[in-house]
Image (cartoon, rainbow, N blue to C red):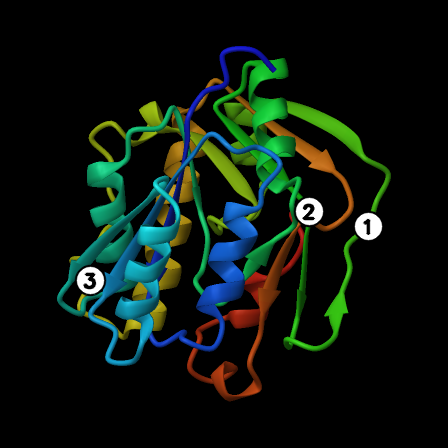
Amino acid sequence: MKNKPLVSVIVPVYKAENYLYRCVESIRKQTYSKLQIILIDNGSPDKCPEICENFAKLDSRIKVIHKEYGSISSARNAGLDVMTGSYVAFIHCEDFIYKDYLKTLIFLCLKYKTDIAACGVCYGNGSSFHRVSKNGKIYVYNNKDAFMSRKIKSGLAGKLYRTTLFANERFPVKEQVSENKQFNFSEESLTYKLIYKSYLVTCIDKKCIIVFIIHLTQIKSRNHLMYRYLPIF
């Protein structure tokens, strides 16, 4: 692939010292290597800030931002403010991605000239995973069809976005609700807004490419947790 565009990967980090290494390593080892990896230490009280700094010393593609604790939306916004890539992906600090994840999504964006590319996902509890595997068929929608038919789930995960979509757009942080509800509302509202702003949206009905870790202790604390981890189709 000639003239590879830079892809920014934004990772809000908070209380994930047991998972952060695997998460960041999965990003560093992507087969698509032209990356800007932005780790936002969201005031984490554990060893995460130190882990982030160690990664930055190890890999020049990694940029670390330290901020006071705030909502996950504020952390993502901090990443958006400094990103320089042509495309952007969002990864949760407890999750990890398969090595061809970004290569697959950037291929879809470039081949079909789309503003958003999405793929299938899988989820699990850290030791066993449910795989969402299909036939690899590719679908291309205009923004109206993608938005009205709700063929793409509202979460940020499993998607790559053209960064121009975020011009004058940030995750809403005004709602004074619990962090989990605020998290879901901000994800859903902005994702659908970005779909509406896009020209074309591409989806690939492919083997699971991104893995989400679900912890049983978080089932009650993460609002609509399982809904977030359903496949896109």
Q: Earlier in the sequence, mark 2 or mark 1?
A: 2
Q: Which residue is at 52% across, 71% downward?
A: 225
* Front residue of 34 and 118: 34
Q: Residue furthest right?
A: 135
Q: Position of residue 220 (x, y in %)?
A: 47, 85
Indicate whether 160 appears above or below 154: above
* Foreground pick, 49 / 194: 49
Element marked by disc 3: loop
Element at badge 2? loop
Compute the Cα span from label 2 to label 1.
8 Å
Residue 175: which numbered mark, if any? 3
Horizontal side of residue 72 vs 8, given as left or right? left
Q: Are marks 2 and 1 in contact (CB under 8 Å)?
A: yes
Q: Is residue 151 visible?
A: no
Kind of residue at badge 1: Ser
Label located before the other in sequence (3 or 1): 1
Give the residue drawn at x 29%, y 71%. 179
- The residue that mark 2 highlights is 120
Asked if one can make out residue 48 in the rendered structure from this viewpoint, the answer is yes
Depth check, mark 3 against mark 1: the one in front is: 1
**Residue indicated by mark 1:** 133
